[in-house]
């Protein structure tokens, strides 16, 4: 008894634990070794060794409740296995599918690219309108001056300065021709100004309509981003989704560029087709003028006016076609040729007076008609051989990648919805086939000539001649394919797409670098760090900012 007490006192004096903790530790040993307490012989160690020896059994057998420090180390692993984001409901899924469909419909219409193009055209056409307004005011002053010169010639005091009547008549005739030419120039300028104002009004209406569509697309993007943020807690559901979205954005930009080019060329072709028809009518009408007797002045003026009105409309349509495709230069019907045609319009009432001038004017009209037909043929070649093929390729590539992105997102959403829903619940939405974009262009049309009663005053042959002018002139012989001017380059048609691809490649390199960092984090047992979601609205606003800066720096 005394020895036991002495031994216990010796242990108590050498151990750093209080006596109560020591008894609990001894009971722990007895319980785990299943030995009687009487057989336990306590051993005496130095304080540091004794603590190590007493802690060793606890390391060999995992206790039911780990220490607090170990719980904190295990907690991140538990968070990693839990999917982020709030639970996905069926209503959220249906809304996502509806948003996806509405967004694709607007993207197929290329509302963003078309809005940028229309805004640029509106700025350009307003500058042209201001120039024509200034030109028209100058022409009006010129008409007043020429009219004053003619009136002055008829004053008695002026007649006295001329030696004979013949000299006076020659001078008066010259002044009258100058006045008549100025009046013709004024009428042409007025029609051009009215036409450009009508185009400005139409473009302004188109910009407002497209602007509303773009704002609607932004709202759809915002709602889709908000919905995906709720599902994935503001991050991408996977690295694959991140990569696919980047590729879709790049292909969408490429398709929009090609789509804008297609829209421009298609609308320009419509304008050019009208110009060809109007030139053909003008040539045919001018040829009819030779069959009208000089005494039938009213009928001759009616023919000349109809010819002039169609020439003016053709000139305006060809100029608008060039404006649509600026800075691409047309190989035929260049600005200098259009200026020559405009001058011929101003002198048409003088050209109708003599057969020689009629013939010279007819040659000018016919050559312009032939070159316009060659330009239309060149348009068809560029559209069919370049633009349509590139559009088909871009549309197919984008559709494939959009399908992959949609499939990956639906897979991620399905994981968060649980497996109780069948595959029919998240089936792919019906694809909305994008039809041909509606042609929306303001076409210049010739003014209707009043005073058609002059036709009834002509002979039966003259009536038949004038009526035949309603048919178009014979179409010029098409040029051989190898004689057509070469098509514009891809950069001229679509912009610098190669630069866009290089930028995308750089973004992919950065993406792959981030993936490698994520992989290293996973190997170290850290939680994977996914990229934050990008805003689709921000992509549109960046495009619009670039579009606004480009005209200012040009």
Image (cartoon, rainbow, N blue to C red):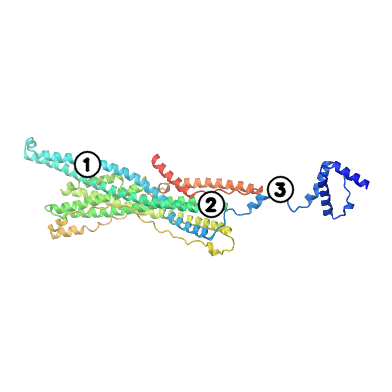
What kind of element bears circle 2?
helix
Label 2 vs label 3: CA separation?
34 Å
* Residue labelled with disc 3: 68
| Percent position of residue 52, x then y | 81, 45
Callout count:
3
Horizontal side, residue 293 vs residue 271: left or right? left
Whichever of labels 2 and 3 marks the residue nearer the N terminus, that label is 3
What kind of element bears circle 1?
helix
Label 3: how many Cα within 10 Å (few below 14, some 14–19, many 20+):
few
Label 1 vs label 2: CA separation?
63 Å
* Residue labelled with disc 1: 139
| Percent position of residue 460, x then y | 14, 60
Horizontal side, residue 351 vs residue 480: left or right? left
* Residue labelled with disc 2: 229
- Front residue of this view, candidates 199 and 488: 199
Q: Which residue sits at x=16%, y=42%?
A: 179
What kind of element bears circle 3?
helix
């Amino acid at each position: 008894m005394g020895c036991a007490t002495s031994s216990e006192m010796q242990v108590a004096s050498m151990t750093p634990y209080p006596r109560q903790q020591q008894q609990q530790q001894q009971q722990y040993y007895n319980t785990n070794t299943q030995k009687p307490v009487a057989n336990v012989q306590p051993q005496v160690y130095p304080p540091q060794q004794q603590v190590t020896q007493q802690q060793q059994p606890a390391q060999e057998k995992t206790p039911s409740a780990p220490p607090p420090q170990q719980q904190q180390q295990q907690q991140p692993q538990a968070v990693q296995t839990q999917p982020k984001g709030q639970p996905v409901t069926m209503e959220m899924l249906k809304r996502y599918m509806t948003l996806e469909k509405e967004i694709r419909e607007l993207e197929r219409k290329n509302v963003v690219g078309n809005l940028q193009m229309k805004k640029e055209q509106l700025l350009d056409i307003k500058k042209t309108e201001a120039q024509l307004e200034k030109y028209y005011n100058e022409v009006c002053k010129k008409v007043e001056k020429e009219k004053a010169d003619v009136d002055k010639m008829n004053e008695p005091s002026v007649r006295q300065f001329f030696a004979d009547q013949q000299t006076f008549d020659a001078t008066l005739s010259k002044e009258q021709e100058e006045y008549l030419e100025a009046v013709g120039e004024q009428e042409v300028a007025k029609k051009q100004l009215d036409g450009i104002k009508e185009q400005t009004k139409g473009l302004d209406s188109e910009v407002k309509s497209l602007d509303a569509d773009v704002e609607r697309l932004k709202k759809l993007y915002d709602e889709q981003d908000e919905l995906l943020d709720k599902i994935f807690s503001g991050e991408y559901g996977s690295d694959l989704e991140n990569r696919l979205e980047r590729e879709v954005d790049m292909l969408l930009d490429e398709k929009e560029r090609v789509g804008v080019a297609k829209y421009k060329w298609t609308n320009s072709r419509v304008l050019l087709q009208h110009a060809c028809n109007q030139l053909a009518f003008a040539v045919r009408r001018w040829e009819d003028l030779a069959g009208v007797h000089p005494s039938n002045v009213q009928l001759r003026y009616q023919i000349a006016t109809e010819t002039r009105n169609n020439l003016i409309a053709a000139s305006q349509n060809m100029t608008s076609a060039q404006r649509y495709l600026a800075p691409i230069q047309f190989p035929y019907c260049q600005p200098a040729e259009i200026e020559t045609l405009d001058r011929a319009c101003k002198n048409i009432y003088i050209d109708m007076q003599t057969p020689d001038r009629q013939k010279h004017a007819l040659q000018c009209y016919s050559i312009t008609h032939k070159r316009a037909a060659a330009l239309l043929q060149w348009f068809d070649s560029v559209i069919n051989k370049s633009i349509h093929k590139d559009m088909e390729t871009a549309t197919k590539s984008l559709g494939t990648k959009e399908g992959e992105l949609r499939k990956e997102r639906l897979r991620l959403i399905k994981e968060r919805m649980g497996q109780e829903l069948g595959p029919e619940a998240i089936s792919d939405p019906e694809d909305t086939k994008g039809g041909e974009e509606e042609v929306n262009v303001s076409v210049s049309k010739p003014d209707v000539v009043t005073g058609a009663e002059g036709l009834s005053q002509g002979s039966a042959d003259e009536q038949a001649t004038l009526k035949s002018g309603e048919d178009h002139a014979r179409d010029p012989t098409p040029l051989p394919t190898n004689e057509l001017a070469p098509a514009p380059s891809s950069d001229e048609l679509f912009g610098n797409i190669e630069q866009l691809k290089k930028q995308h490649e750089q973004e992919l390199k950065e993406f792959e670098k981030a993936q490698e960092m994520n992989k290293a984090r996973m190997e170290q047992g850290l939680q994977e760090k996914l990229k934050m979601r990008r805003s689709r609205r921000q992509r549109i606003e960046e495009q619009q900012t670039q579009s606004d800066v480009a005209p200012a720096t040009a």
